[in-house]
Image: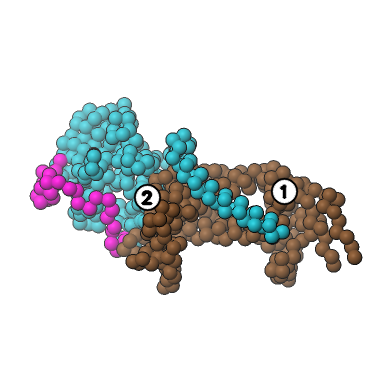
Chain colours: A brown, B cyan
Amino acid sequence: MDQPIPVSVRPLVYRHRLVTRLWHWVNAVTVFVMLMSGLMIFNAHPRLYWGQYGANFDRPWLMIGANGDRGFLSIGDLTVTTTGVLGHWTDSMGNIQRRAFPGWATIPSTYSLSAARRWHLAFAWVLAIGVVGYWLASLINRHIRKDLLPRRGELSPTHIWHDIREHARLRFPTGEAALRYNILQKLAYLGVLFGLLPLIVLTGLTMSPAMDAAWPWLLDLFGGRASARSIHFIAAMLIVVFIVVHLLMVVLAGPYNEIRSMITGRYRLPKERDA
Amino acid sequence: MISRRKLIGGIGAATGGLLVTGCDKLNQSPGFRETLRLGETLSYRAHRLISDRAALAREYRPEQRSPIFRANGTRTPAGDVYAAHAASNFTDWRLTIDGLVARPQSLSLAQIRSMPRRSQITRHDCVEGWSAIGKWTGVPLKLLLDQAGVRDRARFAVFRCADDYGPMHYYESIDLVDAFHPQTILAWALNDALLPIPNGAPLRLRVERMLGYKHAKYVERIELVDSLDRIGFGKGGYWEDTNDYEWYAGI
């Protein structure tokens, strides 16, 4: 039987550039601030519509509310009871609240649209400048081309299916292969970097009446302000899904090694699996 | 391995808890609030930089209007004075224009309605997140301001309103770029009918590149000033002064 190679012998390799690590941690803070202040802003009018307009007399496609002592979430014709979490919950002082998202999920924790807007519209600058800056840096240092763009054959259904199966069995790449992103990682990172993030910035801008006057194409691109607000919310929820999966993968792949590599840039190669 | 996962989970929960309480603490710190305010300054500057002064808000077709136009804020101003005006169809209502102007004005509704009018079907965006589309008709603010002769020193137009918000009446202010914008009107009609009371009868401001709370209702006085310091508590509007909403409400 083979003895596993001791940790000290497996090499510590440079894996993440400084600009990647910097952007990662700035975003780790910014995205949470944007999400939580955004949920508070949503609480001011917990209904989403499609089209150019939408207010209380119009039909929302999504709504969070309270019916007596029952909290609910409605999406189209589907209504689920969410008492305790959405629409009807108890705050840290023991008081019943009928806002959509609970205090533990919002910035600030007690209702204030104006304060949430201050946070959201200040950190929006950090997010947007960060995204554009990271695009430029990653084009120049060839991170996109070398590490993120799928290679020949990686997009084939067989390869993707193989990767999905490996993920489902929690068999992660080892040795040198662990240094490269696999195809699911590449698609997830590309989807966030060039899909969700620009989408959320542009739909955010579409909600600004001054931006709609400056750049009228925003309204045409998203089919109206109410639609842009809906897409903004959906994109935010997809970013939540990304973060949950991302954190799960970090924990499964070995959090100490993964987090170290995102702080110092250095990563210990995982040991080869016994064949 | 289990203990490490537990450790990470514990760290995660603690970070979440710290994040919320930490953010609440930061939210109460004046220095941090001042830092967040940079966002408003940046947005204001950026919008003025990339946008033509006269860039128009989207105007919609009649059939794109909201079936019901939602009213918000004051539905009926309190007090006998306003009630008497409403009972007499605002025949004695006067609009005063004063402050840094060469020729202070006091205009009746009849005079205002006989001036050149502009109609526009625009979208009203509330800071809360809802929007409604309606057709507004009124006199371009530019015509009123030209008639009064705005002095060079003036930098803001302040709107004084008839609705009482406890310690003070509602007030709002805009810069002169927005005041002279072609779509900025004092509206006296909504959807081809005289302006209803919940929507600000007899006169309300439409400043189409701004959120709803800038669109002052029940306007009785327009004051031209060189600074907002002496208006209310100095931030230029009722919601700005009492609840820290942004003075620049283009976003």
Classified by dominant secondary structure, the portion drawn in magenta counts as loop
Residue at the image point whose x is 30% and y is 52% from the top: B120
Left/right placement of residue A129 relative to residue B194 reads right
**Label 1: chain letter:** A
Residue at the image point whose x is 31% and y is 54% from the top: B121
Residue at the image point whose x is 16% and y is 36% from the top: B106
How packed is label 1: few (under 14 Cα within 10 Å), some, or many (20 or more)? many
User: For the residues carrying marks 1 and 2, which lies nearer the camera in this image?
Assistant: 1
Residue A39 among those drawn in magenta = no
Tell me the quarter of the image containing the N terminus of chain B.
bottom right
| Segment tinted magenta in the rendering | B65-94
Residue at the image point whose x is 84% and y is 65% from the top: A274
C-beta proximity under 8 Å, tags 1 and 2: no
Residue A85 vs residue A116, the one in the foreground: A85
Residue carrying label 2? B127
Q: Secondary structure at mark 2?
A: loop
- Taking the view exactly as shown, the residue that stands out farthest to the right is A1
Check the image and report above or below for B63 versus B12: below
Q: To which quarter of the image does residue A87 belong?
A: bottom left
Amino acid found under the numbered disc labelled 1: Ser
Residue B178 vs residue A102, the one in the foreground: A102
- Taking the view exactly as shown, the residue that stands out farthest to the bottom is A77
- The x and y percentages for residue A214 are 44, 46
- The x and y percentages for residue B29 are 45, 37
Residue A261: mark in rendering: 1
